[in-house]
Image (spheres, grey):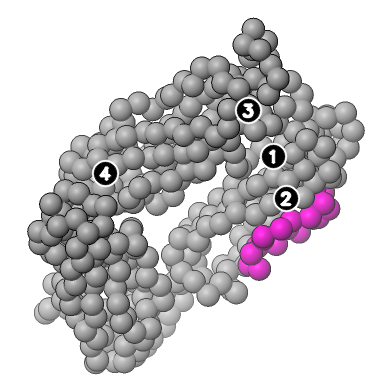
Amino acid sequence: MRKISVFLFLFIAAICHAQLSVNDIVFETEFIDFGTINERDGKLRVQYPFVNNGKFDMVIQNIEVACGCTQPRAYKKRIAPGDSGLIEAEFNPRGILGNVTKWIHVKANFNDGPYKELKFRAEILGANARPETASSQYYRGQFGYLLPMRSSLAFGDLNKNERAIDSIEFKNDGYKAYTVESIDDLPVFLKAVNLPLTVEENSSAYLHFDLNTEILDSIGPIKGSFHLKTDDQFFATKELSYGLVLHQDFDSWTKRELKRAPRLLIDKSTIDMGEMKSGAINVRTITISNSGKTPLKILRVDTDCSCAVINKLPKEIPAGAKAVVEVRFDSLFKQGLQRKGITLYTNDPQNSKAVITVAAMVK
């Protein structure tokens, strides 16, 4: 009976978790205009404060940007109802001229839209330019001559051992043929299948990528970046990103395997650290049990913040066994109500992704 009640609780919590609307997240501004700036002024910081006016936690899953010149970050990835958050990005105008507009896509647990779009613009002058030379005209070569039409490979949700293909179009805006020659930092599970890629003048071509999840040893969200080496005379190196969410394929399990599957039970889904002073560290214990008939494997542990972690968590819990583990919360530089999520990915087909919430009031 306890197993059923825990499952129903997590199932209901998951449904509620998905009821957040894009419009529940209210930003002070969604568009920032820097006006006229100079390339030599260096990097710019853009900030978008917001408040969660919804009834459920906002969980930031990913932040995508228009190009590698923009580096985004979120100070916290889980924002409780009524709490405020901040999306920040650093924009490097080096090598970019003219009137540019960049977008930032904040992806979260929205039930009515894929993302929240933020934008900023600037009129960028060259290092030796005077303000009167500003113009919104696009100059060929101002972003390089070999232009990727997308900044990322988005493979979406995939099952373990599934393959996928995605492509990025390259447009040649120059006066001769240009070539994508090689790639650095590409993970072993991702392969560019048609290198080198030569794009003729005033034409376009596609670079194709093959994703093989069979050799991935992780689960859940997976993302990163890689660098293309080209003979583009202005921007020879181009940074792109990739992202996917990897799931276990429980549909392929037999009835016997499902019957003998491990079963995850957590005695506390929310851990209250109570009131604490900023800089203090509190520790609580929770019990993680396996009521199934085969070993429970802890495949991955993610946390919204390095301030909330689980210590002494075993990678495997035998059938019928339990493990008492420590949950540690560090309140350094924290203030007010804190809610942090720790996500466990397991091989329990009924509860492969469980979230433990760590709460505290920091004075």
CA neighbours of label 3 inside 10 A, class few (<14), some (14 to 19), many (20+): some
Q: Mark 1 against mark 2, which lies toward the viewer?
A: 2
Which circle's residue, 1 or 4, is located before the other in the chain? Answer: 4
Tell me the quarter of the picture where residue 356 sits.
bottom left
Of 69 and 180, nearer the camera is 69
Tell me if label 1 and label 2 are in contact, CB under 8 Å: yes
Q: Amino acid at mark 4?
A: Leu
Magenta-highlighted residues: 180-197
Which circle's residue, 1 or 3, is located before the other in the chain? Answer: 3
Question: Residue under circle 1?
Answer: 148
Which circle's residue, 1 or 2, is located before the other in the chain? Answer: 1
Tell me if label 2 and label 4 are in contact, CB under 8 Å: no
Q: CA distance from mark 1 to mark 4?
A: 33 Å
Q: Is residue 187 magenta?
A: yes
* Image spot of residue 44 (x, y percent): 51, 32
Tell me if label 1 and label 4 are in contact, CB under 8 Å: no
Q: Element under label 3?
A: helix
Q: Amino acid at mark 1?
A: Pro
Q: Mark 2 against mark 4, which lies toward the viewer?
A: 2
